[in-house]
Image (cartoon, rainbow, N blue to C red):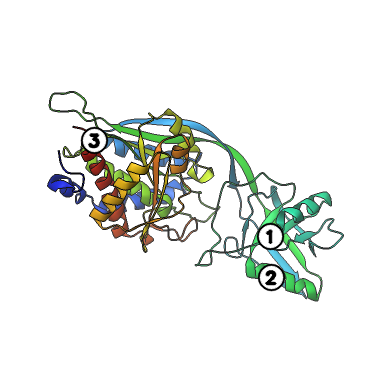
Amino acid sequence: MTSTTTQGPDRASVVERVSAARMLATVHELARDSYAGRRVGTPGGRAAAAWLAERLRELGGEVELDSFPVADVRELYATPELAWSAGGRVRRLRHRRDFVEHLASAESPHPRAAPLAAASEADLSGRWVLAEAGDWAQACERAEAQMAAGVLIARGTDPEGWMPKMIAGPAARAVPIIALRTDQHANLADALTVGPVHVTGSMPLRQVAADGHNVHARFPRASRTGRAEAGPRVLLTAHYDGVGDDPGVRLPAAADNASGVAAVLEAARVLSVSPAIRAELSVAFLDAEETGAWGSAHHAPALPADTLVINLDGAAHLHQAASVEAGGPAHALLATLDQAARLTGVPLRAGAMASDNRRYAAAGLGAVGVGMGMPGYQTPAETPERVQAGTLAAAARLLVATVGLLAAQAPA
């Protein structure tokens, strides 16, 4: 049996068979306009699932599409409006640059104009309320009690000045809530100290139910005698869903997580035709991660207890090191991943990976989450051009090497 401290010539050559060009083509495909950001429960999401199922069938996988219900998905069905005026001057703010939906907002499809009040004022009735930093919940309670027009809170941006989109959050309140960029919130506060301020805002945000669709594939391996070969039970996962387009604005979801899907698909392609690697390999492309990892929560309880799970969420820009989080009985899996990283030259560091890996770990499985960067995360700037070929190659090689080492460690 090959030593567990080396890959061996056969497995080393397998690792080098990954194709960055193929992975980039997958990223570009999933980021196309026709998939509309791949939000769970949408035609674009279902089309992405069907496309991935066909790719896995082409690799010889036994493919199954598994549906499940998803509740409370936030859906922005029109572009929100926000403007304010003071001293005769009107300022119209830009959605996702200057302000964004708060996920606890009540649905308010029609613009409502009203005076602005500080949250500390006694009378909030019929007025927009400017909440102080860190005090939005209390401001909402007072606004609801006094039937205010809505609440404005402060929120930061990403390094590129975008306010990323999310589609899962706390229960809806009874008033509209709009999050302003921190400096815009400060501008309103300053203007309010000088004189009257009027605000006009809408928030066409609702909660909908949807059906998610996981794509599962098993790659049975037969020996020369025709009998199924034993080996470690390994599951490679990545979520394919995104947060979906805004009305009239593309959110391609290239990094999160078309990049991770592309690397897992390429690793499956290489591993499924490599006789040097003996493992019971499965792949799961998961839906509804963006709404709370519903797809993995649905899938995890059905898996055998000895399944080892590697989840890849983001493989677009390996800046310094890949983030790794282990959960469940994953000590041996983590050690093997570390060994594979040293063999393939991929630097690792411990880091939070709040993704599907946590659902598998919570079900008692050994699970590791890996992330290699998401430039433009959940904004219109998350385009295929920002996904690095080298990072895709590094991710796929790491997956292939890890599965290879797990197979080498298994009893003959």
Quote the CA–CA distance across marks 2 and 3: 60 Å
Q: Is 183 drawn above or below residue 267 in the view shown?
A: below
The structure residue drawn at horizontal position 77% and vertical position 66%, both measured from the top left corner, is 198
Front label number (2 vs 3): 3
Residue 248: x, y in percent? 53, 55
Measured in 3D between alpha carbons, the distance from the residue under mark 1 to the one under mark 3, in whole angstroms, is 52 Å
Report the residue marked by disc 1: 134
User: What residue is shown with label 3?
Assistant: 410
Q: Is residue 186 left or right of residue 288?
A: right
Residue 4 horizontal side relative to residue 379, left or right: left
The label nearer to you, 2 versus 1, is 1
Q: Secondary structure at mark 1?
A: loop
Residue at the image position 18 percent from the left and 48 percent from the top: 6
Query: What amino acid is found at the position of numbered circle 3 in the picture?
Result: Ala
Q: Which residue is mark 2?
A: 186
Report the amino acid beneath label 1.
Gly
Q: Quadrant of residue 194?
A: bottom right
- Please state which amino acid type lies under the numbered disc 2: Ala
Residue 26 position, x and y percent, is 32, 49
Toward which corner of the image does residue 308 lie, by quadrant? top left
Local crowd size for mark 2, using a 10 Å CA cut-off: few (<14), some (14–19), many (≥20):
some
Q: Quadrant of the N terminus?
A: top left
Mark positioned earlier in the residue sequence (2 or 1): 1
Where does the image place residue 293, in percent across and percent down from the top left?
A: 49, 41
Callout 1 crowding tier (Cα within 10 Å): few <14, some 14–19, many ≥20: few
Which of 19 and 310 lies nearest the eye of the viewer? 310
Residue 224 shown left or right of residue 159 in the figure: left
At horizontal 26% and vertical 50% (from top left) the residue drawn is 340
